[in-house]
Amino acid sequence: MNTRNLAVYVCLVFTLTFTACNEEKAIEPPSKSDPVGKIDPASKTNDLAPLPASEKLPEAPLEKNTSPLNTPKNSLSFQIELLKSGNVEKLKTCFTERLRDRVTVEAVAKGREELSNHTLDDLYASEERGEYEGSETCKVKMKSGRTLTTLKVQNGEWLADTVWFK
């Protein structure tokens, strides 16, 4: 009886092993050498036949945020470029509403002088993400370890919540 049970057990193990191996092959993606739209020579049909028009999924337009304020680092980089060029009006749009009146010609002129001593890597050495009043925030730290500014997300754009260049 023990020999019979052993034989049944061995057969069961082999069956499960072969089944599992076949399932893994069915799940594996095609190798890179397989041509796309391969035609089975026996059936002469295309394995990748297009879906009927009624079954095609509608193509949604990709909404990619191409704003220069789409990430904290891009936002600070854009602010630096505007500061270098002296464009006060555009620079105001990079700040939260409560600070826009503090971005003045005088502050920009003073910031331009100070900016000549620093690079983007000096000013944006690290970041600390967080949340405040339901809005995502990013505290930007300089190489010295001091906080340069805090950026907040508003309408998908990272806006400075402090005037960092005075």
Image (cartoon, rainbow, N blue to C red):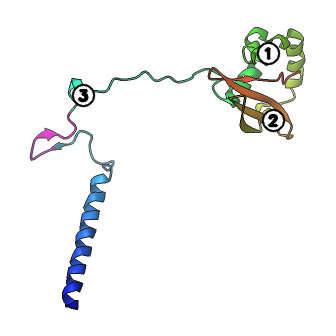
* Percent coordinates x, y for residue 91 in the rendering: 76, 14
Quadrant in which residue 7 is drawn: bottom left
Query: Who's the residue at 36% across and 23% down the image?
Result: 59
| Residue at image mark 3 | 55
Name the side, left or right, on which 51 lies relative to 143: left
- Which label number is shown at residue 122? 2
- Which label number is shown at residue 32? none
| Residue at image mark 1 | 98
Q: CA distance from mark 1 to mark 2?
A: 27 Å
Disc 2 to disc 3: CB gap under 8 Å? no
Sooner in the amino-acid sequence: mark 1 or mark 2: 1
Give the magenta-colored segment's residue range.
Answer: 40-49
Q: Residues within 10 Å of mark 2 (few under 14, many from 20)?
A: few
- The nearer-to-camera label among 2 and 3 is 3
Quarter in which the C terminus is drawn:
top right
Q: Amino acid at mark 1?
A: Arg
Q: Amino acid at mark 3?
A: Glu
Instruction: Determine whether 141 is above or below 62 in the image.
Output: below
Quarter in which the N terminus is drawn:
bottom left
SS under mark 3: helix
Which residue is at the front of the view, 17 or 82? 17
* Percent coordinates x, y for residue 33 in the rendering: 30, 48
Query: Who's the residue at 26% across and 69% down the image?
Result: 16
Q: CA distance from mark 2 to mark 3?
A: 54 Å
